[in-house]
Amino acid sequence: MWLRTSCDLTFDITVPTPFILMLRPRSGAQQWIAREEYSLTPSVPVVEFTDNYGNLCQRLVAPPGIFAVHTVSDVMTADFVDRAPGAPFVEIQNLPDAVLSYLLPSRYCESDHFCAMATSITAGQKLGYDQVAAIETWLRSTIRFEPGSSDIPVSALEVNARQSGVCRDLSHLGIALCRSLSIPARLVVGFLYGLAPMDLHAWFEAYVAGRWYTFDATQTVLKGGYVAIGYGRDAADVAVYNQFGPAVYPTAQGVDVQLIEKEEV
Amino acid sequence: MWLRTSCDLTFDITVPTPFILMLRPRSGAQQWIAREEYSLTPSVPVVEFTDNYGNLCQRLVAPPGIFAVHTVSDVMTADFVDRAPGAPFVEIQNLPDAVLSYLLPSRYCESDHFCAMATSITAGQKLGYDQVAAIETWLRSTIRFEPGSSDIPVSALEVNARQSGVCRDLSHLGIALCRSLSIPARLVVGFLYGLAPMDLHAWFEAYVAGRWYTFDATQTVLKGGYVAIGYGRDAADVAVYNQFGPAVYPTAQGVDVQLIEKEEV
Amino acid sequence: MWLRTSCDLTFDITVPTPFILMLRPRSGAQQWIAREEYSLTPSVPVVEFTDNYGNLCQRLVAPPGIFAVHTVSDVMTADFVDRAPGAPFVEIQNLPDAVLSYLLPSRYCESDHFCAMATSITAGQKLGYDQVAAIETWLRSTIRFEPGSSDIPVSALEVNARQSGVCRDLSHLGIALCRSLSIPARLVVGFLYGLAPMDLHAWFEAYVAGRWYTFDATQTVLKGGYVAIGYGRDAADVAVYNQFGPAVYPTAQGVDVQLIEKEEV
Amino acid sequence: MWLRTSCDLTFDITVPTPFILMLRPRSGAQQWIAREEYSLTPSVPVVEFTDNYGNLCQRLVAPPGIFAVHTVSDVMTADFVDRAPGAPFVEIQNLPDAVLSYLLPSRYCESDHFCAMATSITAGQKLGYDQVAAIETWLRSTIRFEPGSSDIPVSALEVNARQSGVCRDLSHLGIALCRSLSIPARLVVGFLYGLAPMDLHAWFEAYVAGRWYTFDATQTVLKGGYVAIGYGRDAADVAVYNQFGPAVYPTAQGVDVQLIEKEEV
């Protein structure tokens, strides 16, 4: 399907503030960006670079006053999310080198603490995809999804203690559980068509049977319409914006995802 | 200045043909892409990747029939080309690792054959920027610039024998001369505002005093308005399109560069 | 100075166990490896790769039984640790891209929680090197160094609560404090000549004035003799060994560092 | 089999001369380095880095006088060279991104000129491995192998004109022929057990059926015992040493490869 995604962030800046933004979705194996706009008001010099995970990041210093970022993309993405019941676990020794870092514990995914719990949740499952599916189902039925309840990332240990969280929190717990079973898992931040209430979204991917599969415990049924902006080990790696100096929060944030006709593209 | 660049390529394909395109200019230290379109007619699956030089490349298989590629970009680029007379040569041992490969001979820049000639052309010059400027001046006065005279890249040796060439040819010879003096040099392919006749353009950069500087022997005076699409050792690395199987040439090619008002962006 | 470092690890394996080892120090800007041995008993197939941080890692599957890893290196390293009082803080916008990821919170360095504490510890210091030196001094006088007290990494928050720790723990807290001040910091694992009791060692580096500087709160006075094996954001990235499946601990571990004459090399 | 390889290079230096050496074989999927020595006389500071192809390179400035490089490695490598008659051609669209650059013409492999010749040599062969095997056979029977006949690399076009060459020359022609058929091919420089007369060696690899296969037109029958030092597009990328400034050649060069017992390792 063809989607038009947009994101508007507005900040009220008091002192010159360095930002690293990650707001340019990138074409790859799963999606194709046919049109894109990225505007900054006021206009400031920007330098773009690629991070360790292949994400495009934009560096700039926001001047005092109202500072607005506006992005729009027309993206071709899959109509359906691939599911693969029974797809096998990949032995560590057969994983590609580039996937290995997704096995390690990270800031918000203390996988070194979840081995017993993950083993219990996935008891009786075939090793691989079915384990991750059991984790996704367990998250859906156990951790209450409360969109908009939190601005600050919390780690999997705390999500598990609270038994509730935003999309990012559920993903962090899912990732920690997967990694504790030696299944590589990563966080994805992006857009989802039909998300209610509409906002930026986060989900997770697990590596089984030689490729990454999408999982999302916030949705009862996974439909297509996912557009990835960035990938990483957890929210520390894939922040839509990182800002340095005195904390600054968006005074306004608007996200929109529309289905468009291919002819409009 | 803000420029709107566009490129249209049309091919008449007889058998399914794999292509690698390099037509998405990338934001970086020198330019910022504020808007961009990339369309393919008919629409086919595309996978994008980053090559060894940091260029974004698009892989696809063109189906039989008319196949058209259309790209448009709104780009902020410098009003002036930086010049730095007297800027010093960087000793090999002080070059960044990533720059070293631009010292080696490459397909179209047989730098291993030009040492005596480069020494003669740059006699009396201070080592560094002034040597490259002398090479640029020599190229401008010696090698006749004949836009549109050649479709197939030829190497620096042959350019020197012919004493004439297209923009790419002059650049190849300039690069070979620089490298023979142990000055890193690379080819840039992109757009130039005001180029006459308008077409895709190629120029070269040399690394002195800790950064890359722009040189272009095809222009009497270097004004701003350069938009880079790709960087590489020579035309073998930065082809706007590489196509595999029976040779296919564009049946139509259109390039346009307009000055735009920032408000239009 | 020339050092001969050795490390012996012995495991008692019950089921075939995948390992990722990081035991090959690498030549670079700071040290030169003139001789090296790396043996495995029994001999098994090994594949070596380079991780995201540039470390050489060895992948293998250890067979059931006694499994021993033995490494020896002859290394040229600096006689003195560079100190640079007054060296300035690097503004975020001027940091190299490759350094940015060392600003982010990570598994064992929750820098997002230490801003107030770091500000207090470094009150009155010139921004940059002097702040890091104040953190190092504070660690030395506040957090009790207890070598050998812990096998399992704990995070900066917990180290701060316990007020004691091993070399890795003090480093994690130092790193978290630096990053909370927007100073890039990373963990280094390796050898230190004269360490008592002799063991593998961990220290940290901070990026100020355009380069990495060494800090080590476990030593009263920093002498030379540091040999780096690996770099990373924290202990999750630079484990000397990562092992998958049922936990396995070394049954024996021997580390030795000797001063050698250059003629022996 | 276990091999002990050694290489000694001696230069007579007149002015301080920057060198980039590539003399440290690297462990990988095909070989394991169990012991290694790398000494320089006189001892000078060295910085090591990894180039675009994954090779370890050493940068240094050689001082005036006799300058000697001595390397020894104990390496586990395969007893046999894998052969795979019938292994299929990989369609361009299915090649890994990292392999694509080995399709392009390069300094010494002008693949853009060899399409007709390669088609003729491989007439009737199944696409893929069998084409490369036909090229290897054709080289063996057509281009006279004259070890030691040349110090300066020449390109495939000239090798084909001369109808003779050293191991590197035959490889360059083989690579150019493969690439002209859209088969990725690369040059390997290293050691070969049993080579007569003993020297550094060069051969080529072609990518078919999802992996690289070894080809060597200088040997009547391919036995095992290959130890790779470096990989690249051609000899411009994989020079054992690159030296800058006035040309310097080794006054002495010694290469040795011995079969060793595993117990000696």
Image (spheres, coloured by chain):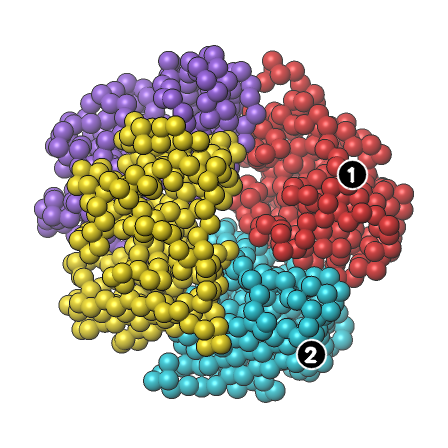
Chain colours: A red, B purple, C cyan, D yellow
Residue D56 visible? The answer is no
Which residue is at the front of the view, D195 or D40? D195
Residue A2 visible? The answer is yes
D54, above or below C218, in the image:
above
| Residue D147 x %, y % | 22, 54
* Secondary structure beneath label 2: strand
Location of the C terminus of chain C (image quadrant): bottom left
Residue D85 is tagged as none
Residue at mark 2: chain: C
Circle count: 2
C244, above or below B53, in the image:
below
Q: Residue furthest right?
A: A141
Distance from Cα at disc 1 to Cα at disc 2: 40 Å
Which residue is at the front of the view, B228 or B30? B228
Residue D17 found in image quarter: bottom left
| Residue B158 x %, y % | 17, 33
| Residue D254 x %, y % | 25, 68
Residue C139 found in image quarter: bottom right
| Residue C39 x %, y % | 53, 73
- Residue, disc 1: A85
* Secondary structure beneath label 1: loop
Within-10-Å neighbours for mark 2: few <14, some 14–19, many 20+: few
Residue B10 found in image quarter: top left
- Report the residue at 81% width, 38% height from top: A218
- Report the residue at 73% width, 28% height from top: A80
Q: Amino acid at mark 1?
A: Pro
Determine whether label 1 and label 2 are within 8 Å by CB.
no
- Residue, disc 2: C251
Q: Amino acid at mark 2?
A: Thr
Which residue is at the front of the view, D231 or D211? D211
